[in-house]
Image: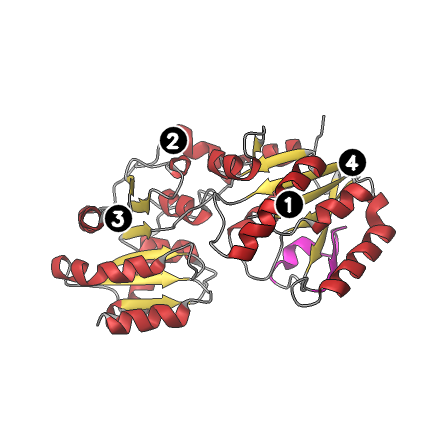
Amino acid sequence: MKRVLVWGLSNNRAGTEAVIEAYVRAADPQKYSFDFLCYDDPVNYGCLFSESSCNRVFKLPIKIAHPFRHRKALASFMDEHANEYEAVWFNANDISNIDILLAAEKKGIKHRILHSHNGNIPKRFITRLFSKINSKKAKRVVTERWACSQAAGAFMFEGESFKIIPNMVDARKFAFDPSARDAIRSQYGWSDDCIVGTVGRLSEQKNQSFLIELLPRLVQRIPNIKLVIIGEGPLRDSLKALAQDLGVEERVVLLPAQCNISEFLSAFDCYVFPSLYEGLSLAALEAQFNGLPCVMSDGVSTETKIATTTQFINLMDVDEWVDAICRAQRTENSLILEKAQAFDAANIREVAERMFEFD
């Protein structure tokens, strides 16, 4: 049995975590087991650590809070366990911290995989500085380069070759459900409303403030419109304040992360996604599998498009955003089947089988 060490699982469940979970669950447990290095106990992933599973969790002190304890704990872990691993699977949005890859190289772990999940990094100076510093180190120690999209690979690997590992969605789970639509709209009092929705972490990257700023103009054309934003994150209070400042607080519904996202998607009339940048968004794929017309920023890779009703608009073109949302309508059979099949989790076992079969 091959044992793989995984970095990238956190209790702040988002797209990267969902991808890791999906591929670990799809891998043959007779061939592979996975150990997870984490900053906290992954309490949201019980299915990965059942009694029949050989998967394990090891905790490290948070580096930014306890840098010396982190370094000592990582070195101690590698001294004790490095010889158990066929590979390290390092999942990242940036390379500001690649300590685990460096330690793996030092201890002779043969396969050191860097898996890129994003198409850019935040404007934070420290993140950009350390990512630049670590760029040459990463080129030296990484043996396999994976990316969720061409955009994510081009960003992370700067001209080097890489392999696409597609983000995958359970197409049947996210298919439109009219009963779920009626139930959610009744539960929240949306029966007579036009619901424009989005799902994602409340962060600068996801740019939900742009949608709130559109609302005063949208209300003029769609008097019964509501904007539903589902997600957790540091910008919740500022988004509430912005809605109040613009006088649209009664039109904005901020909901925490939900376990039944497919039902909410069925309740929406249009999906909006104004991200500043993305790797390849699971949330956007899920919305398209649900049959929603999607309006996305041109910061989202066009690789994400799997439906004829999806369009990409520059964030500076506010008039076109308003027009596109007002025109949006659900359309049956909008999926581009040959593209959608590449992201359908019905095929995930085949991909998972090949992932860790190294040359």
Can residue 251 be seen?
Answer: yes
Looking at the rendered structure, the kind of residue marked 2 is Leu
Q: Closest to the observer: 344 or 172?
A: 344
Disc 1/disc 3 C-alpha distance (Å):
33 Å
Disc 2/disc 4 C-alpha distance (Å):
39 Å
Magenta-span inclusion, residue 48:
yes
Looking at the rendered structure, the kind of residue marked 1 is Asn
The residue depicted at 71 percent of the width and 55 percent of the height is: 37
Q: Earlier in the sequence, mark 2 or mark 4?
A: 4
Q: Tell whether 47 sits left or right of 170.
A: right
Q: Earlier in the sequence, mark 4 or mark 3?
A: 4
Graded by Cα atoms within 10 Å as few (under 14), some (14 to 19) or many (20 or more), the crowding at tag 4 reads some
Disc 4/disc 1 C-alpha distance (Å):
20 Å
The quadrant holding residue 359 is top right
- Residue that mark 4 sits on: 110
Graded by Cα atoms within 10 Å as few (under 14), some (14 to 19) or many (20 or more), the crowding at tag 3 reads few
Q: Tell whether 137 sits left or right of 299.
A: right
Magenta-tinted stretch:
44-61
* Element at label 2: helix
Residue 279, horizontal then vertical, whole percent: 47, 43
Disc 1/disc 2 C-alpha distance (Å):
40 Å
The quadrant holding residue 164 is top right
Q: Earlier in the sequence, mark 1 or mark 2?
A: 1
Q: Closest to the observer: 16 or 24?
A: 16
- Residue that mark 2 sits on: 337
Residue 237, horizontal then vertical, whole percent: 39, 72
Q: Tell whether 317 sits left or right of 299.
A: left
Q: Are marks 4 and 1 in contact (CB under 8 Å)?
A: no
- Residue that mark 3 sits on: 316
Q: Is residue 153 above or below residue 278?
A: above
